[in-house]
Image (cartoon, grey):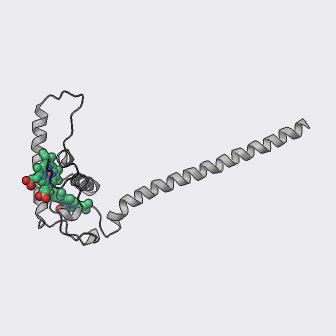
Amino acid sequence: MAFRATEFRGLFYSNIVKRAGINSVLKSIGYLASVFMVFTLLNVPLFAQGFSWPEKPENLQVLGEEYTGRRLGGMMRQFIIGLGVRCEHCHVGEAGKPLGSFDFVSDENPNKNRAREMLRMVADIKGHLAKIDPSGASRVEISCNTCHRGLTRPIT
Ligand code: HEC
Ligand code: HEC
């Protein structure tokens, strides 16, 4: 009798363990799937349209030569978030059209040179900031967003 009870218990527990095992496998699959989804959602709009960040940009006049590929992409993302705009705000291309149809090398869009001057200005401001001894423990990083805060023209 005691033997059978233990056997039964053993069966019961191993069932729970098995189920827990399946559950955690399902959970991990779910987790991996959602991570994959996030990456897909982030990348598809940019990369599925015959576009990839150039490893050899042809017309950088302000950004240093280290701004290639994903690093250049990081800077452009900082621009669109800081100013609340999309690529066509500074580049030649039509809203909603695939990025592969854009001409990113062209300087025809006047906002591109405006943005270049902003990059020079931010570099100057950084020079001034470096001269003060900040009251806080760490320095405040200045970026486009410091002034623009999501606005194309940062009107107070
Ligand atoms: C606020 C303006 C602005 C926005 C918005 C912007 N860019 Fe740019 N982009 C620039 C400027 C300015 C340069 C050139 C930098 C330089 O001269 O150092 C540039 C350069 C580039 C280059 C390099 C082209 C080459 O070969 O010389 C690519 C590619 C690019 N941008 C893609 C994008 C994409 C994709 C988006 C949208 C996700 C975007 N940009 C949004 C201003 C902008
Ligand atoms: C110190 C504050 C400040 C910072 C930092 C700053 N901007 Fe600006 N930006 C301005 C102001 C102010 C204007 C509006 C100038 C005007 O039209 O009189 C402006 C205008 C612009 C314009 C023209 C918008 C239009 O529609 O006329 C672009 C493009 C731009 N900024 C891009 C950038 C980018 C890209 C960065 C980061 C590299 C940046 N700005 C950083 C203050 C700033």
Whether residue 62 is visible = no
Whether residue 102 is visible = yes
Side of 7 where 107 appears, left or right: left
Q: Position of residue 118 (x, y in %)?
A: 12, 51
Q: Residue at x 19, y 44 (%)?
A: 146
Q: Position of residue 32 (x, y in %)?
A: 50, 53
Q: Residue at x 55, y 50 (%)?
A: 28
Count numbered badges in the picture.
Answer: 0
Q: Position of residue 54 (x, y in %)?
A: 25, 62
Camera-nearest residue between 60 and 126: 126
Give the vertical position of 140 relative to 54 (above or below). Answer: above
Q: Quadrant of the N terminus?
A: top right
- From this viewpoint, which residue is outermost toward the front? 156
Side of 2 where 20 appears, left or right: left
Q: Quadrant of ligand 1?
A: bottom left
- From this viewpoint, which residue is outermost toward the right? 1
Q: Position of residue 66 (x, y in %)?
A: 21, 51
Camera-nearest residue between 156 and 35: 156
Side of 113 where 32 appears, left or right: right
